[in-house]
Image (tube, grey):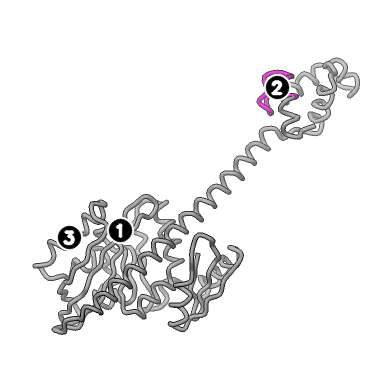
Amino acid sequence: MIFKNEEHIYLLKNESFDPSFLQTLAHEKGYQVIELEEANELKKILTQAQKKEPLHAKEEEPLIFLQHIEKKALRDRFSRLFAYIQWLIAIMNELQVGFMMSDGKQPLLISPLAREISGLDPYSPEQHPIESIIKEDHKSNFKSSLTQLTKGEIHQFSAEFQVEPPSALEKMIQFYGKTLNVNHCSLVVEYLIEKKKHVPAPESQNSYNHAIIMELHRILTALCGLTGLNLEQENDKKSQKNKKTTERSRYNLTTREKQILKLIYQGDTSKRIAEKLYISKRTVESHRANILHKTNSRNTAELIHFAIGNNLL
């Protein structure tokens, strides 16, 4: 789990994730990597960052459109992923790679550079930013490829397109589309590189761009997987806690019931227990019935077995 804040990148140590590439790239871009041992440390930093600045406080910050996600589980997972990849989006901007995520029709996330390339109006985000500005002769192929990505029929797609942003001159972009599974839902990740018009890129540049996109997507996929693992761990902890609470409440014996249970274990009859505790036999039998119910025991033998196994004696 990783979070970027100003010039620092905070990295929560995880044995299944090799951070060496990130550390090298971050250092080249002037960021200092700080490794954290405990999740609570990262949680505190995230909380402080959210208090200092809202997600949409600055024009140069990425935009997220949670209103386009209907399912709450996916919305929560996507929101958490968005918080974790802030530093990665910043690096993409510096590498001149625009970044978007969509459901194939509507944008879910768009980086500052992608917003600049597409000329997206943040107040009218209902249509896919690239689909709305791509030239007609490319539009059909583009829409078909997005649909295939969303359905999982293909897992990647790349092409050069001419686009006409509303507030800029016509430009050429290199588009890379890849799938990302988030909470069992296939989303489309889109990387945009603006190309110099009428200047063919050398083969080495194309190879470099392809390698950069592959590496960025590998990192994004790893981070998405980590958010899933962390959520599963949190849910497991909540489930275990709820289970323990339920179990405790089910056989949470009173002081009197514990006294009677101990005497039952010693072999005393209800009459003998009543004499020892100076209560009526009927009261003892009532307590005995409550103890059997709380411990889900059908008889005295099962009760004793349960009491020993759960340290109730």
Q: Is residue 268 left or right of residue 44?
A: right
- Which quadrant of the structure image shows residue 219? bottom left
Who's the residue at 71% across and 28% down the image?
A: 306
Q: Which residue position is annotated with label 3?
A: 143
Disc nearer the start of the sequence (1/3) = 3
Q: State whether the magenta stretch is mostly helix, strand or loop.
A: helix
Asked if the magenta segment contains residue 252, the reply would be: no
Q: Is residue 244 above or below residue 146?
A: above
Q: Which residue position is annotated with label 2?
A: 302
- Where is residue 28 drawn, in percent x and y? 44, 82
Type of amino acid under label 1: Thr
Type of amino acid under label 2: Glu
- Where is residue 79 drawn, in percent x and y? 42, 61
Report the span colored magenta. 290-304
Which quadrant, please, contains the C terminus? Answer: top right
- Spatial separation of the CA atoms under disc 1 and disc 3: 15 Å
Who's the residue at 35% across and 59% down the image?
A: 67
Q: In terms of secondary structure, where does tag 1 sit?
A: strand
Q: Of discs 1 and 3, which sits in the foreground?
A: 1
- Spatial separation of the CA atoms under disc 2 and disc 3: 66 Å
Disc nearer the start of the sequence (1/2) = 1
Q: Which residue position is annotated with label 1?
A: 179
- Spatial separation of the CA atoms under disc 1 and disc 2: 55 Å
Within 10 Å of the Cα at label 1, are there few (<14), some (14-19), or many (20+) other Cα atoms?
A: many
Q: In terms of secondary structure, where does tag 2 sit?
A: helix
- Where is residue 9 drawn, in percent x and y? 50, 75
Query: Residue pushed farthest front?
Result: 204
